[in-house]
Amino acid sequence: MEWINSSVQEKQQQQEENGAVEGLYAKVMTDEQMELLRKQIAVYAMICEQLVDMHKSFSAQYDIAGMRLGNPYLDPFMSSGGQKFTTRQRWTPTPVQLQILERVYDECSGNPGKQKILDMTTELAHHGQISETNVYNWFQNRRARIKRKQSGVPSNTTESEAKKHVMSKKYTTPESIQSFENPTARITENNIYFQSPNIGMEQIIGKMDVAGMVYSPPLPHWQMDRYDMLG
Amino acid sequence: MEWINSSVQEKQQQQEENGAVEGLYAKVMTDEQMELLRKQIAVYAMICEQLVDMHKSFSAQYDIAGMRLGNPYLDPFMSSGGQKFTTRQRWTPTPVQLQILERVYDECSGNPGKQKILDMTTELAHHGQISETNVYNWFQNRRARIKRKQSGVPSNTTESEAKKHVMSKKYTTPESIQSFENPTARITENNIYFQSPNIGMEQIIGKMDVAGMVYSPPLPHWQMDRYDMLG
DNA sequence: CATGTATGAATGAACG
DNA sequence: CGTTCATTCATACATG
């Protein structure tokens, strides 16, 4: 999945065709909206670049090894609360582990053998504390939840009909893009607005780290069905 | 090129709100495309924020007065008056809905059947956007919280929900990045929680450098799906 | 604007 | 396996 880079300029064109072809159920954006998006992204890219540059030259001057990293972060575990070694009560997969798990899940069609689980556990253990049970549960849960999502939300037929013609307030645009409805959204060459939902940095970092930009799809399992191309 | 391309599953609307769309100059995007875009941007924002924060704390320690501000990275952005794209990331019951929910909760002793939930959802939908999942979650949460309140009331056993005090967040909006100020995105050095790998500037820079922002959906489970249109 | 609190949602684990 | 519980995270909202 390729994405915007510094020169976002042209990329958008494709989208038009792409989307248009799909036709039937789709959101529509005006050229202005697209333009807004394009600029927004371009600006972000630019800022990122600048920041990085700045940081580079800056930190280069003060190569204070050691303190440079990990510093800004709070150790989530021994937070100032001081009391117990706030060791988690329940296992939480690290991004790396998750990545692996998801990959395997896909490979095994969600049902790895017992041996497989054991092997995995060993491997996963290299990336953080984990037990066989954890792995087992994880698979179990994932299967169950995926399933539920599929059956429970056969967003099907009868329903959609009904609301389709109501289509006024409820079941309108998903929150995810409500921003586009905002009439105040305006774009001036220097003034671009766009909502920035709070996506956990850890997720992002995690994915980036492991997949290294290329991203082997952990993908939105819930609701996505197009990810059968990974191995 | 593989741009956001996917299966569509929603109708589009919002046309009437944007007069421009009415006719000819409209581009079409699927929901997934939109979602991907949104996330892409979110990631940019997040990374920028992160970078700024890091830079800030980094430079702060050396009192390199002057160069910290006046920066290149503030520039043109929304100087301040940023409106907020009405962003609702999570469902919030309307008073009416709440009333109904509570009534039913009492009736069902907290545990309505699946069918019941479905019916309710339909009814509740008349009073505002809602989905079956919302209702389901609502009951879950209510049961859990009521239970807890009854058993171990105060701070002691309920530390889980009470221990949030551990993290003090000071977030002094860096003048340099006011542009990123967003009510929903408040990532600071103190509230970032890295599950395991402590990733520093290097990683981010590295990725950015190389890929110039190639990104794939990091799959923020929260707020991702679950917005089925059953409701 | 900063901080605290209520609560929707995600998810590991447990249950039947 | 499907369902439910328990814990935790993150955000909406109220407050000083």
Image (cartoon, coloured by chain):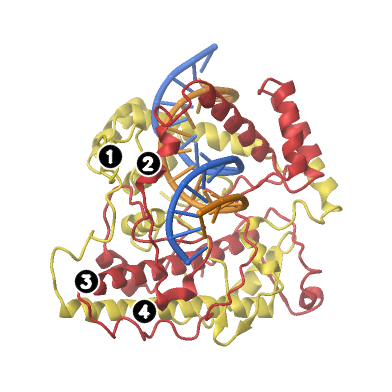
Chain colours: A yellow, B red, C blue, D orange
Asked if marks 2 and 1 touch (Cβ < 8 Å), the reply is yes
Q: Position of residue A131 (x, y in %)?
A: 29, 30
Dot 4: chain letter = A
Please tell me whether mark 2 sits on a helix, a strand or a loop.
helix
Q: Is residue B186 left or right of residue B130?
A: left
Give the image location of residue A167, x and y in percent: 82, 55
Q: CA distance from mark 3 to mark 4?
A: 23 Å
Q: Residues within 10 Å of mark 2 (few under 14, many from 20)?
A: many
Query: Quarter of the image holding residue B63?
Result: bottom left
B115 vs A147, nearest the viewer: B115
Residue A193 visible from this viewpoint: yes
Task: Say whether residue A4 is visible.
Answer: no
Q: Are marks 4 and 1 on the same chain?
A: yes
A62 vs A112, left or right, is left
Give the x, y percent position of residue A190: 54, 86
Kind of residue at disc 3: Gln
Quadrant position of the C terminus of chain B in the picture: top right
**Kind of residue at disc 2:** Leu
For the residues carrying marks 3 and 4, which lies nearer the camera in this image? Answer: 3
> Mark 1 is on which residue type?
Leu
B78 to the left or right of A182: left
Which residue is under mark 3? B61
Q: Is residue B138 above or below residue B197?
A: above
**Disc 3 and disc 2 on one polypeptide chain:** no
Of the numbered discs 2 and 4, the one sitting upstream in the chain is 4
Q: Residue at x 59, y 27 (%)?
A: B143
Residue marked by disc 1: A124
Residue occupying the point 47% across, 32% down: A141
Q: Which residue is under mark 4?
A: A49
Please tell me which of labels 4 and 1 falls first in the chain. Answer: 4
Marks 2 and 1 sit apart, C-alpha to C-alpha, by 8 Å
Secondary structure under tag 1 reads: helix
